[in-house]
Image: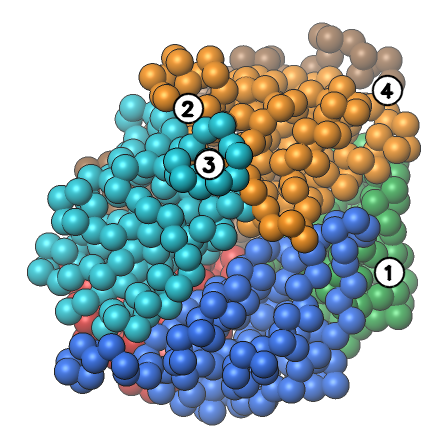
Chain colours: A red, B green, C orange, D cyan, E blue, F brown
Amino acid sequence: MLHTVNKSPFEKNSLETCLRLASAGNAILLFEDGVYGAVKGTRFEPTVSNALTNNKVYVLVSDLEARGMNTDNVIDGIETVDYAGFVDLVADNKSVQSWL
Amino acid sequence: MLHTVNKSPFEKNSLETCLRLASAGNAILLFEDGVYGAVKGTRFEPTVSNALTNNKVYVLVSDLEARGMNTDNVIDGIETVDYAGFVDLVADNKSVQSWL
Amino acid sequence: MKFGILVNEGPYQHQASDSAYQFTKAALEKGHEIFRVFFYHDGVNNATRLTVPPRDDRNIVDRWSELAKQHNLDLVVCIAAAQRRGLLDENEAKRQGKDANNIAEGFRISGLGQLIEAGIQSERLVVFGD
Amino acid sequence: MKFGILVNEGPYQHQASDSAYQFTKAALEKGHEIFRVFFYHDGVNNATRLTVPPRDDRNIVDRWSELAKQHNLDLVVCIAAAQRRGLLDENEAKRQGKDANNIAEGFRISGLGQLIEAGIQSERLVVFGD
Amino acid sequence: MEDEMMDEEVIKKFLYVNRKAPYGTVYALESLEVVLIGAAFDQDVSLAFIDDGVYQLKKDQNTSVDAGAGMKNFSKTYRALEAYDVEKLYVDKKSMDERGLSVDDLLVDVEILDEAKMAEMMGQQDVVLSF
Amino acid sequence: MEDEMMDEEVIKKFLYVNRKAPYGTVYALESLEVVLIGAAFDQDVSLAFIDDGVYQLKKDQNTSVDAGAGMKNFSKTYRALEAYDVEKLYVDKKSMDERGLSVDDLLVDVEILDEAKMAEMMGQQDVVLSF
């Protein structure tokens, strides 16, 4: 199962609820304003790092770059993908849950 | 100065930031989904009750009723107003800050 | 007292337009003056005459048009925001080479300067948005 | 693989429509099939031909129309959501007694059943919204 | 799996995820409209109410087009879901607890799920529509 | 006060409050468009960046209509504000700290305010436009 989060964790509770209800082994993709959750040095880094022990976490690189960041700013263990990678994630998982 | 908050404190950080940046003596009006912040028994009751020591807090009664609650559900010390009361609050304060 | 109103969200999607309407009506009922209601962001979508809401629901666009008629309200739609979202009057449609227009009665399209002017001329400006 | 796409927000206001477009394009480039793109909530506003975005910005509506033309995409606008928000085709305008319509090329208006059908017929359904 | 998908008569598991409060935005109302239309398709339908979505089911919603907030009260429609054979309504326990809500506050019968059970139920779905 | 309001030549204190991230929604871009138009009116203008609004000022925003996210990069416009005599840019300290940002990460000069100073500045305003 793939979870997508497109909200900043600072603004909305979507990432928090996603992490709470994602099963171990589920994939999580952060995109749009959700990419801020993938960034090193923020208040949410410990939460997201902790999620990496149970879940693969991905971040959409074009949304990261639009917001002035790149792979170097991403928490260790989070994988960057482009839209082709986003498509693969959807294809490789049985269903998609968007945490709007 | 009047602050208005129209977001649920569970969903967004608007109320939290409003309470952090409102000066003592400022008035705060909760309306639309913001009315959930005025309700007794939620996780946010202590935060909002605490704000009452420095600020007058109001809640729009029609938005409360639309959502299945009424004056009985409101934290002690919060005053209910109708739209006429909302208008008075705007008139009585020098400026209005909407925490969207 | 003289109020200015800013509406930042479209009809039905968000309560902002409902709240702005109820506030405006209440202010008028209390004898206040509404200098202008300015529609910005998706708020410009409040000004389309092409909506057909369900019969058992409120008609948000008509409600604004009627209030404007009753109280001679100045309902101004931001031209830049309107162009992005497909809201045009007859003049704009001609100027842009579009074959239709969709603005409702009682609304006019103008520039962002009208919002600043509302801030300057009104004694209070109230923002309704998301 | 066969994908269905749901778009819940209007153009420019929210990135959802941009993301859905980029995803759809990437899926097509990888050889996947798009069963349908369904526009719901304010997403119906992606289907207006009356937008005039600034020249240095993307034209979201045209981009969808062109992608539909290139790949024979089925772009469906929810009729109930469209009626609330003032999005009409020629038939709907006639039926509702409206004097104008605003739908763009490549989009068609239909019922919510088309969304359910997209869920049933597609192997994956992806939701873009706010 | 591929073959099953091609079969027009397959019954899929549809989940509607509701995480937003009613009235502040249109999502709750328009989500319900999808559920009602979808009921005609004989799929296996579940509804989840999480975060502020649980407020959609709050009893005593009192609004009318002509008074107060001036909006249409659609809460009675949740009661009609049973007649459409939509009977699997799941509510997130933590969301209820944080809001001080109990099943007595809700206008329909629901099953309260803890995090593990909610996650499990979600994992069984074929199509997830989020609002 | 009443008389002052009636005077066409009064200079009012306008505050633009920016609390949303860029690109995810249009508010940052369209707020900036109001600031630019408003600059022609010779009012006393301040901008506050709070919560995710501080991300609007992040350096190195890299997007174009033809690649990546496919959106217009408007971040250079913040650098042009000085030419419009818009020079009072205030940033909330806690918002910066929570995001691990320092002034070196921002593309314009700003004044960082603690909560007391931000509250004081807000209290001095005549017109507050929130986005």
Q: Nearer the viewer, mark 1 or mark 4?
A: 1
Q: Judge if badges 1 and 3 mark residues of a common chain.
A: no
Picture coordinates of residue C111 (x, y %)?
53, 18
Please give the label number shown on residue F30: none
SS class of the residue under badge 4?
A: loop
Badge 4 sits on which subunit?
F
Which amino acid does the dot numbered 4 rest on? Met
Please give the label number shown on residue F1: 4
Residue A47 located left or right of residue C4: left
SS class of the residue under badge 2?
A: loop
Q: Nearer the viewer, residue D83 or B63?
A: D83
Residue beneath disc 2: C100
Q: Quadrant of residue E72?
A: bottom right
User: What distance separates the C-alpha of mark 3 from that of mark 2?
Assistant: 12 Å
SS class of the residue under badge 1?
A: loop
Which amino acid does the dot numbered 1 rest on? Ile
Which amino acid does the dot numbered 3 rest on? Ala
Residue E65 located left or right of residue C8: right
Residue beneath disc 3: D93
Picture coordinates of residue B64 (x, y %)?
78, 61
User: What distance separates the C-alpha of mark 4 from that of mark 2?
Assistant: 46 Å
User: What distance separates the C-alpha of mark 1 from that of mark 3?
Assistant: 49 Å
Task: Assess whether mark 2 and mark 3 are in contact (beta carbons under 8 angstroms).
Answer: no
Dot 4 crowding, Cα within 10 Å, few <14, some 14–19, many 20+? few
Q: Quadrant of residue C65?
A: top right
Residue beneath disc 1: B78
Residue C36 drawn above or below residue B42 = above
